[in-house]
Amino acid sequence: DQQVKQNSPSLSVQEGRISILNCDYTNSMFDYFLWYKKYPAEGPTFLISISSIKDKNEDGRFTVFLNKSAKHLSLHIVPSQPGDSAVYFCAASSGAGSYQLTFGKGTKLSVIP
Amino acid sequence: NAGVTQTPKFQVLKTGQSMTLQCAQDMNHNSMYWYRQDPGMGLRLIYYSASEGTTDKGEVPNGYNVSRLNKREFSLRLESAAPSQTSVYFCASSEWAEQFFGPGTRLTVL
């Protein structure tokens, strides 16, 4: 059973508009959430994270929102740029010891110039 | 700093052959991980090492073995490769939740 779900395999957005990527989780023990960005033929790179004690975290054009009651988080990219075109993975950690991450299947974002 | 390095970048094996994927990190991280990425499946954890001298199974360990050689190096071994092990393999390291990934090894088993 998937504990981290990204239900949209792909998303297309016009340059300059907002991109919203969604992620749902089922495990109540998850207390730290991360977003990774992956370009083809490269490894994933860390983008932004949020602790379960917060409901929002911003870093430049990227904002992550966490709704614990709904077990839902979202990544907002404003404004979207063509260089943002990549696969975005949501990941969650229970923070217990080894900091294992459970990943979603990813959402491929295409930003159209 | 090179971060996380992986060798080789590409490899083609025949069914039944063995090979070892190498990973090294220069960030002095305690924890290291091996993942595989298959189309539409995201990243799945094969094995991890929480600290030097320890290793544990992840979600998909069957057909693999690992060795934490020292704090820097964590290798993944396929003893008898199968076509189902065709995948892209990523190594990662971390000091806590944020993991840093290598560039990956693309493995094809014929």
Image (cartoon, coloured by chain):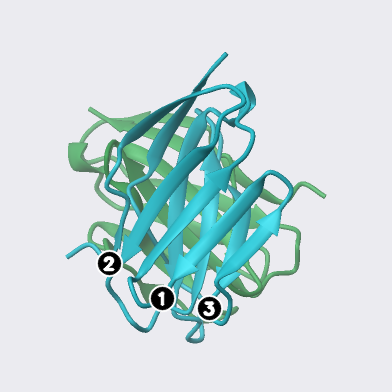
Chain colours: A cyan, B green
Dot 2: chain letter: A
Q: Looking at this rendering, what residue extends furthest in the front direction?
A: A17
Q: Which mark is on residue A3?
A: 2
Judge left or right: residue B33 versus residue A10.
right
Tag 2–tag 1 contact (CB < 8 Å)? no
Label 3 to label 1: alpha-carbon separation? 28 Å
Q: What secondary structure is marked by label 1?
A: loop
- Tell me, yes or no, whether dots 3 and 1 are on the same chain: no
User: Is B14 situated above or below B45?
Assistant: above
Q: Disc 3 or disc 2, which is closer to the eye? A: 2
Write the residue at 51% across / 76% down: A99
Q: Name the residue under label 3.
A: B50
Q: Which amino acid does label 1 sit on?
A: Lys
Label 2 to label 1: alpha-carbon separation? 14 Å
Q: Which mark is on residue A68?
A: 1
The first of marks 2 and 1 along the sequence is: 2
| Front-most of residues B4 and A2 | A2
Dot 3: chain letter: B
Judge left or right: residue B4 versus residue B28.
left
Q: Which amino acid does label 2 sit on?
A: Gln
Q: Looking at this rendering, what residue extends furthest in the right direction?
A: B1
Answer whether residue B100 is visible to the viewer in this image. no
Give the x, y percent position of residue A2.
22, 62
Label 3 to label 2: alpha-carbon separation? 22 Å
Dot 1: chain letter: A
Give the x, y percent position of residue B69.
58, 68
Q: Which amino acid does label 3 sit on?
A: Ala
| Front-most of residues B97 and A69 | A69
| Front-most of residues B92 and A2 | A2
